[in-house]
Image (tube, coloured by chain):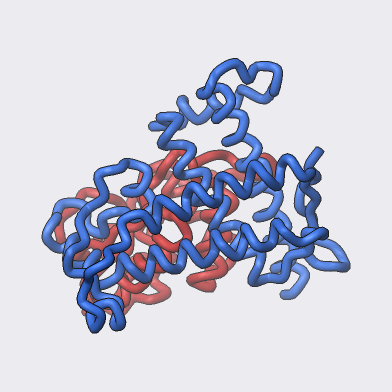
Amino acid sequence: MTPSVAFGTDIDERTEAVEQTSTDVLTAPDIPWNLVIWNDPVNLMSYVSYVFQSYFGYSESKAHKLMMEVHRKGRSIVAHGSKEQVEQHAVAMHGFGLWATVEKAASGNEAPGKGGRQRG
Amino acid sequence: MAKAFKYGLKGITGYLEPAERDLLRGLLDDVISMLESDARENEDPLAALIGLDMDVKQPSDRALLRLLPNVMKDDDGGSLEFRQLTERSVRENKIGALKATAMGLDKDDLVLTPEDAIHWSMALNDVRLVLAERLDIRDEADAEHIHSMQDWSQAEDVESYLALVYNFTTWLQESLVQSMMAARQAKS
């Protein structure tokens, strides 16, 4: 992503621990699909964070954390749900110009947040 | 000179010179034509009515593919099926935001309602995505290189001109998003 000009100082210091990723807002244990946002060098960090706040209703800190995860790790699971739910989110994300894909939560990918049961 | 968007008593306001408005209008029109270009003429009217598009294909143009990406990483069939069901509405949504922004440029004062601001931020983002493909921005290092070109006296060829245009739209979108954040905080 492109760093925001006015982007602040407090880059979060969290470790790269696998547990500290993802979100559980839309999670139910039996729901098997993830919405993934991928990093790209164009989208503004501020814009990505704004979209996470305005579309998903995430808090500023949570949106920031997910945005930083996209930026640093290349991708982040930002929502869970049924296939239909995450596809609907993907349509909205493509509308905003974010690079979003959907995947089965148990597809065995090596990305952080696999399983998506962690506290967000 | 353009002024950055800011949030104040009147809402989100900005200022663009006539030449800057023309430039932006041209960019918006380019992206609109890209998104409209392969509209089919002899398609099934019923399918069109419910938003289906069975003839849709993955875009061959990289910029268009970035605007309308595959929804699954390793499943072309699944991605195509998703396109058939949704691509038309994504295109129409984008075209709507781009056209609303172009119309906003015809007004004397740039005073954006919250809805305008969302349209503008989406439209500027799509313009930047397309410019970035034309500029071959593939990674953060490319982006930094382009970003370092800030002096209009450097505009010697198409690429440097495009880079400066890209940086202008980046600056404009950034100030807009910061204003939208400020508006959001003021409301809460």
**Quarter of the image with the C terminus of chain A in it:** bottom left
Please name the residue shown 56% across and 69% down the image: A54
Please name the residue shown 80% across and 67% down the image: B11
Residue B71 appears in the figure: yes
Residue A59 at x, y percent in the picture: 57, 67
Whether B107 is drawn above or below B47: the answer is above
- Which residue occupies the foreground of this view, B187 or B79? B79
Residue A119 appears in the figure: no
Residue B50 at x, y percent in the picture: 29, 82
- Which residue occupies the foreground of this view, A44 or A26? A44
Please name the residue shown 72% across and 70% down the image: B113
Whether B98 is drawn above or below A110: the answer is below
Chain A display color:
red
Quadrant in which residue B119 is drawn: bottom right
Query: Which residue occupies the extreme left position in the image?
Result: B77
Chain B display color:
blue
